[in-house]
Amino acid sequence: MQEEGKKLVLFFGPPGSGKGALSQMFVEKFGWLQLSTGNLCRKHCKEGTDIGQQINIAIKSGKLVSDQLIINMVMDYLKNDTNGCQAVILDGFPRTVFQAEEFVDLLKIYYSKFTIFFIKLLITREELVARVLTRRTCSNKSCQSVYSEREESCMPLVPGICDKCGNKLFQRDDDAIDSISGRLDIYYEHENKLLNFYKNTGQKIYNVNSQDTIENVFKNIEKIIGGECDID
Ligand code: AMP
């Protein structure tokens, strides 16, 4: 596989901004790889691994997991699961300046040949709350596909059942009304610092309006990053 044309796409946005659903669409359309640190954390919790036991409380209450644990998970993934890939989407990482600083070093090791696209999803807080409250997730830890009870194009074919694997959909603990406000506060607390960090390091940030249908948001991102590295 040629080194040229490889892409690393970073989705940056609050919970409910569409990172997971958009990543899924790129994975399905182009066969790209996706690492969602949130999905990975939830998988550890469901499997009851050592890491899962350490992070269970943070995940359920919507608090951030320790930077070092997250960085180790991402490093393991990059080292073991991305060989020969054409494009990788990172969904939900880096989330703090500490993670971003470490990430710069990871980039030099694993992604020196990749073009990086930093996509920031823009959406109002009111819309986020409405989306998260109506979000439903596949209970299969290896699937975790995301659906909406509100947006028609994101509804499952059979209510309450995942189109892809047939498992039941559920509402994540951290998507319940008690957790959302705190999760958004935590996200915004880090957002400005992260944006300043990226500005200072000269990273170009593409702002994309995410308050639109998922199809339109997908098309707009596709225009920015191009779909030409389809691996079929
Ligand atoms: P998400 O699915 O991206 O909303 O993530 C769900 C939860 O996973 C977050 O509320 C955090 O507890 C944890 N998490 C995911 N990504 C990170 C990260 N980069 N840093 C710290 N915690 C994370």
Image: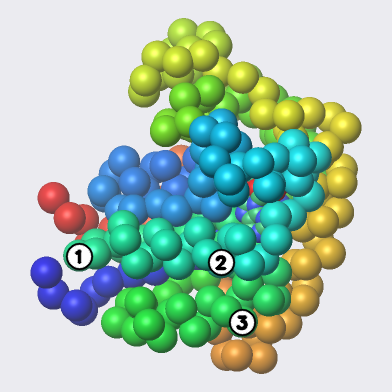
In this view of the protein, which residue sits in the foreground, 62 or 175?
Answer: 62
Q: Earlier in the sequence, mark 2 or mark 3?
A: 2
Q: Which residue does the numbered mark 3 point to in the structure image?
A: 101
In this view of the protein, which residue sits in the foreground, 158 or 208?
Answer: 158
Q: Position of residue 66 (x, y in %)?
A: 70, 61
Crowd rating for badge 2 (residues with CA inside 10 Å; few <14, some 14–19, many 20+): many
Q: Position of residue 214 (x, y in %)?
A: 51, 40
Residue sitting at the far top: 158
Give the residue type that dot 2 points to: Ile
User: At 67% across and 23% down in the image, what residue appears?
Assistant: 171
Instruction: Confirm if mark 1 falls within 8 A of ligand 1.
Output: no
User: At 63% across and 67% down in the image, what residue appears?
Assistant: 68
Residue 158 vs residue 206: left or right? Answer: left
Residue sitting at the far front: 50
Question: Residue 13, located in which quarter of the rendered image?
Answer: bottom right
Question: Residue 110, located in which quarter of the rendered image?
Answer: bottom left
Crowd rating for badge 1 (residues with CA inside 10 Å; few <14, some 14–19, many 20+): few
Residue 71 is tagged as 2
